Amino acid sequence: MSPPAGHVMLSVDNIALSFGGVRALSDVSFDVREGEIRAIIGPNGAGKSSMLNVINGVYHPQQGDVSFRGEMRRRMDPHRAAAQGIARTFQNIALFKGMTVLDNIMTGRNLKMRCNLLEQAIYIGRNRREEIAHREKVEEIIDFLQIEHIRKTPVGRLPYGLQKRVELARALAAEPTLLLLDEPMAGMNVEEKQDMCRFILDVNDEFGTTIVLIEHDMGVVMDICDRIVVLDYGRKIGDGTPDEIRSNKVVIDAYLGVSH
């Protein structure tokens, strides 16, 4: 798979992040092109999730800058990041377990809602029309991810793999231009991983969504990603296409397996 020729959507430059005396990221730089699937890989503790948290504003780096769609910034809060089109799923599922699948996905439309609290309380006029429009969008996502049969089921009753799919649906409900996926296939069996791979590729192809994902399954990463950045102990040790990463001796020794 060759990398797309899209413009640079996201650029992280010389990012350094510390927690007390612990250095999570050290002088990390890479970019993400519009329309690509970009992977961040590395051993546990390499700084992968910290990097996603920097991108969507959960963490504020002590050094470096993040540029999204040409806008340079040092500090970003998650609400503003979401408003600009950055959506996120988490390594540990963060859903409302007592709510139905449909209601969980509807929460992803929150930033798209324009009615005030009074209009929402009385549920007439503009609010009613707005909610119908949002519900239609959510139903499209439910159909797209093939979860119609569980739409009225409380999320807490679902198996792990389906909960992961619901979390993806909620992120898609925000209509992101950049989707951050933190270990979307962790804990899944082979069949569930195959389904999730297909959905990620379809989101990228049919919606045109740019995707950055963290994933430990190297078969998955090599099959579906256009480019890969490799972190180890908070430092970047590799960056390139799957073929380039496969043949990178530093990456092989540190992560993929001893080169000899």
Image: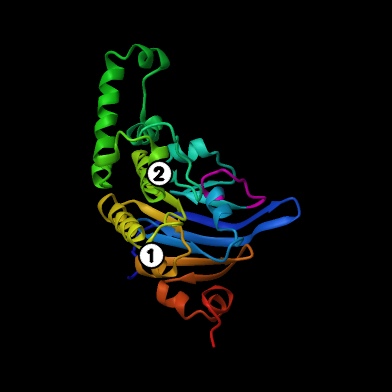
The image quadrant of residue 260 is bottom right
Between disc 1 and disc 2, the foreground one is 2
| Viewer-closest of 112 and 94 | 94
Q: Residue furthest right?
A: 21
Horizontal arrangement in the rendering, residue 195 relative to residue 41 (left or right): left
Location of residue 207 with respect to 248 vertically, above or below: above
CB-based contact (under 8 Å), mark 1 and mark 2: no
| Amino acid tagged 2 | Glu
How far across and down, in percent of the image, does residue 113 sit? Answer: 36, 27
- Residue 76 covered by magenta stretch: no
- Residue 58 covered by magenta stretch: yes
Horizontal arrangement in the rendering, residue 197 relative to residue 61 (left or right): left
How would you classify the magenta stretch by its main secondary structure? loop
At 55% from the left edge and 54% from the top edge, which residue is drawn? 49
At 51% from the left edge and 79% from the top edge, which residue is drawn? 248
| Amino acid tagged 1 | Cys
For label 1, the residue is 225
Q: Which residues are magenta?
A: 54-63
Q: Secondary structure at mark 1?
A: loop
Horizontal arrangement in the rendering, residue 153 relative to residue 30 (left or right): left
At 45% from the left edge and 47% from the top edge, which residue is drawn? 89
For label 2, the residue is 167
| Viewer-closest of 36 and 42 | 42
If the image is split into quadrants, where does the N terminus sit? bottom left
The image quadrant of residue 102 is top left
